[in-house]
Image (cartoon, rainbow, N blue to C red):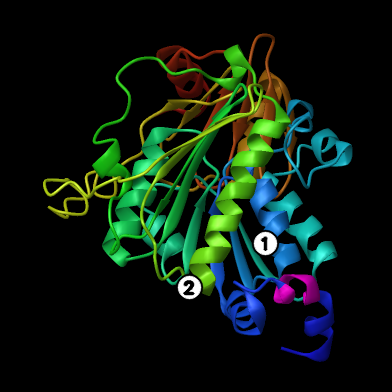
């Protein structure tokens, strides 16, 4: 590190569990943040300010005004221009710390791209909004021995679990299967920014601890309720000797093939993966202009219809806003794009 680094991170270096050696480890590390919403945007800013060497940002979505209440890094200008979150976050982070190498990917994490996007990093932070992606992260973590920190928030409630694949339980040990019942969503139940900020802050602190060397690591699950100021830690989270992921090493989400449609948290919208072929957005815009209001840039194509708003991405994804009905969303997509 340079003399400037020693000055910039002096208060962090003075914190004995980090020290100069720990700060150098942080400076040498690469962290991937999956999802740049309420959790991921906070994590990204905190790590950039902490002097992380390299950040990879992965997010499938764009900034909206409803995000600004709780999603750090973004401005009204980002929402007005509907800038992809990964791009807007990267721009802001480069202003905060020019020494941090930031790579941004406007993409949905899927079984087909997960290994390429996540391999080679030192740690993964969960900023996602659905269990399917979290189990995919867990598969990658176990397969390649990459630590990660699970986190989620809804209302005033949050949950955090750090995972070190060689040091105890993974996510699938504790939660063998995704929830079978309907789960609460931001769209219906809301969320307060102190809850998301607290979950993200704890995730980031645990990430830093892992990066500098957490020698006495023991897995646990922490739950918080910010409205009640209630924190509870479940210790003794044991590895399941029959776990499908870390014991049997069967990676059902990583090997699961094409990503299924998913209703988006906090949005009256459905994300579709109807085609694996890339889309030429400029060409598509010319085709669709006679049918509705179309706006296009290098990142996305936006089409406004009387009842729905569709967003197409270069990787073939689409977001249909105005419904949570997957069948209806697919029907609208098929009428415009085909199978």
Could you say which is closer to the camera, residue 194 or residue 132? 194
Whichever of callouts 2 and 1 sits on the residue coming sooner in the sequence is: 1
Residue 90 counted in the magenta span: no
User: In x, y percent, where is residue 308?
Assistant: 63, 15
| Tag 2 residue | 213
Residue 11 counted in the magenta span: yes
Q: Mark 1 falls on what kind of element?
A: helix
User: In x, y percent, where is residue 316?
Assistant: 49, 41
Which quadrant holds residue 147?
bottom left
Horizontal side of 90 relative to 220 (left or right) equals right
Could you say which is closer to the camera, residue 317 or residue 241? 241
User: In x, y percent, where is residue 173?
Assistant: 24, 43
Bounds of the magenta span?
Answer: 9-14
Q: Is the residue 118 above or below the residue 290 in the image?
A: below
> Residue furthest toward the right?
77
Residue at 65% across, 23% down:
191
User: In x, y percent, where is residue 156?
Assistant: 62, 24
Q: Mark 2 falls on what kind of element?
A: loop
Q: Is the residue 19 above or below the residue 135 in the image?
A: below
Q: Is the residue 189 above or below the residue 201 in the image?
A: above
């Amino acid at each position: 590190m340079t003399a400037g680094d020693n000055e910039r991170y002096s208060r962090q270096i003075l914190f004995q569990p980090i020290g100069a050696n720990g700060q150098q480890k942080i400076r040498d590390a690469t962290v991937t943040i999956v999802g740049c919403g309420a959790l991921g945007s906070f994590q990204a800013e905190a790590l950039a300010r902490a002097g992380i060497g390299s950040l990879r940002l992965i997010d499938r979505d764009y900034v909206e005004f409803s995000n600004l209440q709780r999603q750090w890094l973004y401005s009204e200008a980002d929402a007005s221009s509907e800038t992809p979150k990964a791009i807007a976050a990267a721009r802001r982070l480069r202003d905060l710390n020019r020494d941090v190498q930031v790579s941004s990917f406007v993409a949905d994490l899927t079984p087909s791209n997960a290994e390429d996007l996540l391999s080679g990093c030192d740690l993964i932070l969960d900023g996602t909004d659905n269990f399917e992606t979290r189990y995919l992260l867990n598969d990658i973590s176990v397969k390649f021995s990459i630590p990660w920190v699970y986190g989620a928030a809804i209302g005033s409630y949050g949950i955090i679990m750090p995972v070190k694949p060689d040091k105890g339980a993974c996510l699938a040990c504790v939660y063998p299967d995704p929830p079978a019942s309907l789960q609460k969503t931001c769209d219906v139940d809301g969320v307060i920014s102190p809850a998301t900020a607290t979950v993200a802050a704890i995730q980031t602190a645990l990430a830093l601890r892992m990066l500098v060397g957490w020698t006495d690591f023991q897995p646990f699950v922490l739950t918080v309720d910010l409205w009640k100021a209630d924190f509870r830690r479940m210790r003794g989270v044991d590895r399941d000797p029959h776990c499908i992921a870390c014991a049997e090493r069967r990676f059902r989400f990583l090997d699961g093939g094409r990503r299924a449609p998913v209703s988006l948290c906090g949005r009256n919208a459905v994300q579709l993966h109807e085609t694996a072929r890339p889309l030429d957005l400029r060409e598509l815009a010319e085709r669709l202009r006679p049918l509705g209001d179309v706006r296009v840039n290098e990142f996305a194509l936006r089409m406004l219809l009387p009842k729905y708003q569709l967003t197409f991405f270069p990787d073939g994804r689409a977001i249909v806003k105005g419904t949570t009905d997957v069948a209806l969303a697919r029907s609208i997509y098929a009428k415009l794009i085909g199978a």
